[in-house]
Image: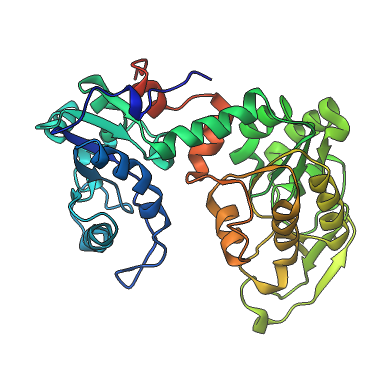
Amino acid sequence: MTAVPTLEDLPPVAGKRVLLRADFNVPLRDGEIADDLRIRAALPTIEWLRGQGADVVASTHLGRPKGKPDPRYSVAPVRARLAELAPGVELLENLRYDPGEEANDPAFVARLIEGFDAYVNDAFGASHRAHASIVGPPQFLPSAAGRLLAREVEVLGGLRSNPRRPFVAILGGAKVSDKLEVIEALLAVADSVLIGGGMCFTFLAAQDASVGDSLLEDDMVDTCRALLDEHGRRLVLPIDITALGPGGELMKPQAGGDVRQLGAEIPAGWKGVDIGPGTAADFGDRIAEARTVFWNGPMGVFEDPRFEAGTRAVAQAVADTAGFTVVGGGDSAAALAQFGLDDEVDHVSTGGGASLELLEQGDLPGLAALRGEWKA
């Protein structure tokens, strides 16, 4: 993986205006910030720039306003919190209020960089998007990665190139089709890949197991069978399942429906929702022995208390292992926070989709742009 220029590679910024592309796409509830982690994550970069005498102006997207102003996605709450954490740092309005942002319109890039002397990208979670604010400014301004982005590249690049072994990856999520490339990429470097979440049922079906009414991608069964044939024991599947019986509904315990521990065979009318306790123990043992661990994707519908046990067990195992631990953002990071374990891992990525794409491809549009190598 090619390195990106860092803050120290910028020309002197004293007295200069620096455009900081941050990822302040924070969760909002009733107009209030529910979690300001992404704002606080940008502070080391802001503090370095201001310590060098720069005038910092931040920019971000927030939600999906579809190319026009929408008061639901105003950055006003973010601006207020940023003013508390880094007084004097200006924040531009939501970049996605202009259709030119997602379209990577050169005219929008020109307006965005007007009056700036340098550019810093610290928005790892958006750097897999070839949007104007990500790939445009490096074509015209001295540019560098902020502290957060540089750390993400260092950690995730290390997983691809030089992990300490054994290297165990745990993948969850709903669909094999969404994770196929990252499964293949991890199988190329990991000693074992543990499969949970909804996508495990397509793999189980590839072993001719009955999966009942569980989530199943029929068109991916042959692909899963080929992966199992090629990689054998390195691709580890659940040995038991926590399932919801007929009539039950997820997130609605009051609707009824039995919850049972089943083997790898699920009868008709039953839906697999979480890995079972035997699988959780097996996965936990493998994680405990690892020297490098990467986890992305919950093991079940952990938002429903009836089906949180598998994800909780994996989260605890990741927190407890002595190995170097990386969690790939998104739902996995949310699960860590729910279980109070987010401070117990070595690195929690700020970009779910970006972390997976970086592992798959070894590069991102935002990184290539910083190196001067991005092409549409």
Relative to residue 376, is residue 164 depicted above or below?
A: below
Q: Can you give x and y, in whole percent of width and height, for residue 372 in the image?
A: 33, 16
Residue in the foreground of this view, choosing between 360 and 245 = 360
Report the side of 13 relative to 210 (left or right): left
Q: In this orientation, does residue 166 appear?
A: yes
Query: Left or right of 75: which side holds 29?
Result: right
Q: Where is residue 330 in the image (x, y as percent from the top left)?
A: 53, 51
Image height of 153 relative to 36, above or below: above
Taking the image as drawn, is residue 269 in sight? no
Residue 259: image location, x then y, percent = 79, 73
Q: Measuring 71% from the left and 26% from the top, which residue is drawn there?
A: 189
Q: Where is residue 117 in the image (x, y as percent from the top left)?
A: 16, 28
Image quadrant containing the C terminus: top left
**Quadrant of the image occupied by residue 98:** top left
Position of 129 with respect to 297 (left or right) is left
Task: Tell me what residue is drawn at x 43 percent, y 36 percent.
Answer: 149
Image-quadrant location for residue 13: top left
